[in-house]
Structures are given as structure tokens and as C-alpha cells.
């Protein structure tokens, strides 16, 4: 199982969320992608479904807690992630 975490900068976000993500999805072991925006408190978790489709879930704001399904539902509190930034 592969989980990829990308920190998106304004200059690379389009590529990371587009062409690069399309490449990652060709990898059989790839199951989840966590995209962390560096310029605002926002995390997108893309999770591969049993039928091979991908489901995005947006977490936006400091009080949100992202769920990382392929890490046994591990919570990722945005407030903690962005603390000091």
C-alpha cells in the first residue's frame, strides 16, 4: 500500500494536483494521496475506492480533522498541522 503526501505551493499546485496525480494513479499499490496546501489551512485526501475510482474529501479550516483511511483512520488535525505557520 502506498500513501503519498504532497505539500502544494502556489507555483506547483496545478502540476501536483494534475499531471503528477494522474501518474500516481497508474501505480497499483497507490491507495491514498494527501494534498496539503501551504498557503491556506486546507487538506485534500484522495482515497482509492474498491472499484478503482478515486474519492476526494476536502478539509478546510483550522478546526477540521482529516481522516487518513489507509492509515487505519488516523486523524490529522489541521490546527495541529498548521500550528506556527
Image (cartoon, rainbow, N blue to C red):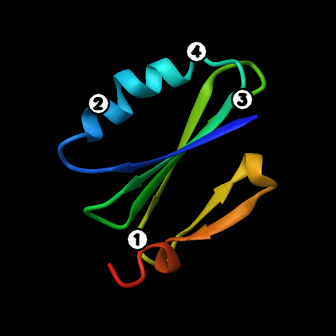
Q: Earlier in the sequence, mark 2 or mark 1?
A: 2
Q: Earlier in the sequence, mark 4 or mark 2?
A: 2
Kindly identify which residue carries mark 3. Answer: 49
Q: CA distance from mark 4 to mark 3?
A: 14 Å
Q: Residues within 10 Å of mark 2 (few under 14, many from 20)?
A: few
| Residue 42, x across and y down, in percent | 39, 60
The one of 49 and 82 positioned closer to us in this rendering: 82
Q: Which mark is residue 15?
A: 2
Furthest residue toward left: 11
Left/right placement of residue 45 relative to residue 41 reads right
**Going 43% across and 76% down the picture, which residue do you hit?**
62
Secondary structure of residue under mark 1: loop
Q: Which mark is residue 26?
A: 4
Secondary structure of residue under mark 3: loop
Kindly identify which residue carries mark 1. Answer: 61
The one of 7 and 51 positioned closer to us in this rendering: 7
Left/right placement of residue 32 relative to residue 1 reads left
Q: Earlier in the sequence, mark 4 or mark 3?
A: 4
Q: CA distance from mark 4 to mark 1?
A: 31 Å
Secondary structure of residue under mark 2: helix
- The reply to whether the C-beta atoms of the residues labelled 3 and 1 are less than 8 Å apart is no
Discs 3/2, front: 2
Q: CA distance from mark 3 to mark 1?
A: 25 Å
Q: Residues within 10 Å of mark 3 (few under 14, many from 20)?
A: few
Furthest residue toward bottom: 84
Relative to 31, say whether 35 is above or below.
below
* Image quadrant occupied by the C terminus: bottom left
Q: CA distance from mark 3 to mark 2?
A: 23 Å
Relative to 51, say whether 67 is above or below.
below
Amino acid at each position: 500500500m502506498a500513501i503519498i503526501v504532497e505539500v502544494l505551493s502556489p507555483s506547483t499546485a496545478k502540476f501536483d494536483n494534475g499531471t503528477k496525480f494522474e501518474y500516481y494513479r497508474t501505480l497499483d499499490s497507490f491507495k491514498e494521496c494527501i494534498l496539503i496546501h501551504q498557503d491556506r489551512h486546507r487538506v485534500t485526501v484522495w482515497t482509492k475506492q474498491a472499484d478503482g475510482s478515486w474519492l476526494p474529501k476536502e478539509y478546510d479550516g483550522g478546526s477540521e480533522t482529516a481522516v487518513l483511511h489507509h492509515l487505519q483512520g488516523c486523524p490529522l488535525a489541521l490546527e495541529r498541522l498548521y500550528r506556527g505557520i
